[in-house]
Image (spheres, helix red, strand yellow):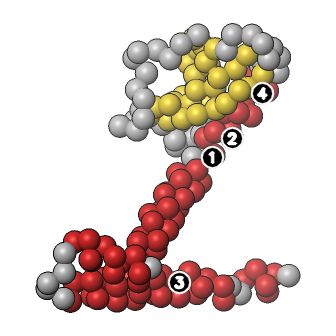
């Protein structure tokens, strides 16, 4: 089993071949659309559509959006997991609705937990500061609303 984990996967070349085929087809379509000088823009778009480049461009943009979302999701789960676990241990009677990174400071991210005491109760926010270096979680208090002074998003 150890040997199988140390051997690099051959399937890693499949995305590379896909990118090369996509790029080659896109270059061929662009070359065909812009090779004739007497074509109008609608004619060029029609050539792109016939060559299949418009659906491929849409597919590529959607692929980039999915890849960016996956990267963003994989980048911060450590903070979210640790705050979720800390909150569940500190306040077992509260129901967590969601946990999000709501801001950033030089010390680390500010994580907000939306919680309620029961399913039908009015939700409130609990804020935590996560130290990037030590991983220590500091409770910043709770509020029924997002405070104005809280920096939203990375700075």
- Give the spatial CA distance, label 4 vs label 2: 11 Å
- Give the spatial CA distance, label 4 vs label 1: 16 Å
Q: Which residue is mark 3?
A: 18
Query: Is 4 positioned to the left or the right of 55 in the image?
Result: right
- Give the spatial CA distance, label 1 vs label 2: 6 Å
- Looking at the image, is mark 2 or mark 3 nearer the viewer? 3
- Looking at the image, is mark 4 or mark 3 nearer the viewer? 3
Helix, strand or loop status at disc 4: helix
Q: Can residue 60 be seen in the rendering of this structure? A: no
The reply to whether dot 1 and dot 2 touch (C-beta < 8 Å) is: yes
Q: Can residue 11 be seen in the rendering of this structure? A: yes
Helix, strand or loop status at disc 2: helix
* Quadrant housing the N terminus: bottom right
Would you place residue 121 above or below residue 48 in this image?
A: above
* Quadrant housing the C terminus: top left
Would you call the spot at circle 1 few (<14 residues within 10 Å), some (14-19), or many (20 or more)? few
Q: Earlier in the sequence, mark 4 or mark 2?
A: 2
Residue 82, picture quadrant: top right
Q: Which residue is mark 1?
A: 77
Q: Earlier in the sequence, mark 4 or mark 3?
A: 3
- Give the spatial CA distance, label 1 vs label 3: 29 Å
Q: Which residue is mark 2?
A: 81
Which residue corresponds to the image point at 79% horizontal and 17% vertical from the top-left?
119
> Residue 83 location in percent, x, y?
66, 33
Would you call the spot at circle 2 few (<14 residues within 10 Å), some (14-19), or many (20 or more)? few
């Amino acid at each position: 089993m150890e040997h199988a984990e140390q051997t690099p996967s051959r399937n890693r070349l499949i995305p590379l071949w896909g990118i090369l085929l996509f790029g080659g087809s896109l270059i061929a379509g662009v070359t065909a659309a812009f090779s004739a000088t007497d074509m109008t823009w609608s004619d060029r778009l029609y050539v792109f559509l016939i060559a299949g480049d418009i659906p491929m461009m849409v597919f590529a943009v959607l692929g980039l959006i999915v890849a960016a979302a996956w990267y963003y999701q994989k980048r911060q789960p450590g903070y979210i997991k640790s705050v979720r676990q800390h909150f569940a241990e500190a306040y077992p009677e509260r129901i967590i609705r969601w946990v999000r990174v709501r801001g950033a400071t030089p010390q680390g991210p500010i994580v907000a937990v939306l919680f309620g005491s029961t399913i039908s109760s009015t939700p409130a926010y609990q804020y935590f500061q996560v130290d990037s270096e030590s991983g220590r979680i500091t409770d910043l208090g709770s509020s029924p609303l997002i405070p104005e002074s809280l920096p939203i998003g990375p700075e």
